[in-house]
């Protein structure tokens, strides 16, 4: 668990959690448990994705993957324990029990059969899909909104956001989730393994459904610009000072090179 | 998920949950979410245990194991989704948010690095241990108290038990956890696969640390009797009518043939 979660990584998700909590008027410290939970869940999903029966990857964050170092069974147990610890940590947030219960519920939904796990399962089942299937874009959107988009709502709840604010955060998070993935897909075909710290070109080898494959590289890049603008659009109406870090993060996600 | 959880099974854990909730004065219906959660977690642990990189088992509850039918990656995703759904379901219990938060926390502890997953990880790492190692019994106890013993406390919390009552349930649950396992170990060496609905003799083949291996078969059977009596001892002081179903279940666990 320590090896996987302390291997580095950009920590974009937990930073987003803190920024979202402040956005809706909560103190940063309130969102620390949610931020840790989200990073644990993300790490669990990476351990799982890299398994031999999933993407079978040897390299992650520039280091050998967890199962390469500790074996498959330890890797799988680590993933389960990280997911569990994520829920345990949430119960320690310094907010009302009502708010914690809602956060646990939102986070569970963001992970389960209508969330992250659904997205990843569909991602795997899409391998080998042809380029011109009907509904491919809808499918891609479903996968990636669910894979990374839904984890931020918990922070809006913890921070005490109104229903309207939580809804805005949800829409922002959906754009961010897609943005993350479109950029990932582009980097996978344009960068080397050394630049990425993970195996490059593997989507193509696995025949995975990706944005460059469905839209082409140029249209994928245009989509990045559109998502970046849409994400910022959903932040309108919030305190302009508190929006700033989220704008910076949105730009970082759109412009990153690894 | 449906295939694994609806494959049958004795449902002893959820029934125990309901009985424990009533034991501490709660209505049965309050514990339904906890009972479902516990069965989902149990099913997740079975799916995981049966994986090729764990016990590599083909048969469970008389049917092919989940990964045999749906493939390893679907099996692993199902396990994660069941664990997540277990937490989601808990948030729907019709009790105060305070009580739900504590239940989530207790259940997380019962699963994570100090619970079920710890027990299973140690179980695997014990494979191939010699018969006369120092501390083997302590190790066995750690594994199995953690593997099945800790899931009942959540029901005592949901049911509104006092701290003293929760402590008694915890001790009862520890005995039941061990009892379950000692009987499982005995059945593994005395029954056929057809009688068990799962592969018999596999502990021996895997060189697993088991009670018959460490204590011998006769002393293991004596241990069953002692645990059965100890479990009942911890139920003293509760309403005698409410204790009855737990006595029946304890006897059932001790005397079962599969």
Image (spheres, coloured by chain):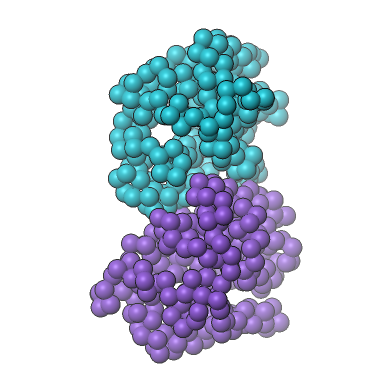
Chain colours: A cyan, B purple
Residue drawn at (34%, 76%) of the image: B137
Q: Classify residue B253 as left or right of residue A253.
A: right
Q: Classify residue B89 as left or right of residue A17.
A: right
Q: Nearer the viewer, residue B74 or B43?
A: B74
> x and y percent of residue A138 in the render?
65, 25
Q: Classify residue A76 as left or right of residue A99.
A: left
Q: Is residue A250 above or below residue B248?
A: above
Residue drawn at (54%, 27%) of the image: A209
Quadrant of residue A165 within the rendered picture = top right
Q: Is residue A63 above or below residue B238?
A: above
Asked whether the viewer can see residue A27, the reply is no
> x and y percent of residue A247 in the render?
52, 15
Count every numbered label the image shows and give the total. 0
Q: Nearer the viewer, residue B41 or B51?
A: B51
> x and y percent of residue A129 in the render?
57, 30
> x and y percent of residue A124 in the render?
53, 37
Residue drawn at (45%, 28%) of the image: A203
Residue drawn at (55%, 11%) of the image: A219
Q: Classify residue A66 as left or right of residue B180.
A: left
| The C terminus of chain B sits in image quarter | bottom right
Asked whether the viewer can see residue B249, the reply is yes
């Amino acid at each position: 668990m320590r090896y996987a979660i302390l291997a580095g990584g950009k920590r974009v998700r937990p930073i987003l959690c803190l920024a979202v909590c402040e956005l809706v008027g909560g103190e940063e410290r309130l969102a620390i448990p949610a931020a840790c939970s989200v990073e644990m869940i993300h790490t669990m999903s990476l351990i799982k994705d890299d398994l031999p029966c999933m993407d079978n990857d040897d390299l992650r964050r520039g280091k050998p993957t967890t199962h390469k170092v500790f074996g498959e069974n330890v890797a799988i147990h680590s993933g389960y324990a990280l997911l569990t610890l994520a829920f345990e940590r949430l119960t320690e947030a310094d907010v009302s029990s009502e708010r914690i219960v809602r956060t646990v519920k939102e986070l569970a939904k963001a992970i389960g059969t209508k969330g992250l796990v659904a997205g990843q399962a569909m991602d795997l089942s899409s391998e080998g899909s042809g380029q011109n299937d009907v509904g491919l874009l809808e499918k891609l959107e479903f996968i990636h909104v669910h894979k990374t988009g839904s984890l931020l709502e918990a922070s809006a709840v913890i921070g005490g956001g109104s229903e309207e604010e939580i809804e805005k955060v949800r829409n922002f998070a959906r754009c961010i989730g897609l943005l993350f993935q479109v950029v990932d897909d582009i980097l996978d075909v344009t960068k080397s393994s050394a630049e990425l710290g993970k195996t490059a070109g593997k989507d193509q080898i696995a025949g995975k459904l990706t944005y460059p494959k469905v839209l082409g590289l140029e249209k994928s890049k245009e989509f990045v610009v559109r998502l970046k603008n849409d994400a910022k659009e959903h932040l309108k109406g919030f305190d302009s000072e508190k929006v700033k870090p989220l704008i910076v993060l949105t730009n970082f996600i759109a412009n990153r090179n690894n």
